[in-house]
Amino acid sequence: MTNKRFNKTFFSNLALIALVFALVLAGFWGPQIVRAMGIPIDPARFTAVYFQNPEIVAKGIAAGDLVVFGITNGDRLAHKISWQMKSGNTTLQSGVEEIAGNSDKLIAKQSTGAAVGSRLEIYAGDLKTPISVWVVG
């Protein structure tokens, strides 16, 4: 009877150790194994641009006003994202910002040189459609 109890305890302890080992391995290599099986676990990368204060879209801005906009890096890795501030066909300012993975960065720039009666447009990354605000005065 003691031998059966020993075998039962030994095998249940061995099963518990194997389970813990499998969980540890899954924690380290689980994402790679799932990706190798063709199951998508990472969301698609995206870039977003927005005004910090969305009310300026309704009110408009005056040429020279400070415009604060944000850029979102929707990827798990850091990326350098380029941006442009345009008025009509004129590029007023441009730059490149390094943004950490799954993070936002606010950028504050003067709208000096913006043409009254036109839209101030801000492009970011590979986005084809800008955010824009009317220059009213």
Image: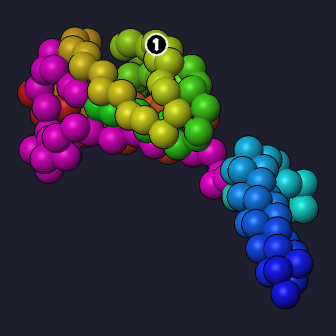
| Magenta-span inclusion, residue 64 | yes
Q: Is residue 16 visible?
A: yes
Q: Position of residue 88 (x, y in %)?
A: 39, 27
Relative to residue 57, is residue 49 drawn left or right? right
Rendered location of residue 125, percent (x, y): 56, 31
What residue appears at the point 57 percent right and 45 percent down from the top-left corner?
Answer: 46
Which of the image's four quarters has the C terminus?
top left
Residue at image point 16% right, 20% down: 66
To which quarter of the image does residue 109 belong? Answer: top left
Does the magenta-highlighted stretch encompass residue 124? Answer: no
- The residue located at (76%, 59%) in the rendering is 17
Locate residue 122, reporting x and y percent. 39, 31
Q: How many marks?
A: 1
Helix, strand or loop at disc 1? Answer: strand
- Residue 77, given in percent of the width and then of the height, sits at 61, 32
Give the colouring mode of the picture.
rainbow
Question: Relative to the observer, which residue lies in front, 24 or 42?
Answer: 24
Residue 127 shows up from this direction: no
Amino acid type shown at disc 1: Gly
Which range of residues does the magenta coloring cover? 42-68
Q: Nearer the viewer, residue 28 or 74?
A: 28
* Left or right: 117 as drawn, with respect to 2: left
Q: Which image quadrant for residue 38? A: bottom right
Query: Quadrant location of the N terminus?
Result: bottom right
What residue would you read off at disc 1? 95
Position of 43 compared to 33: left or right? left
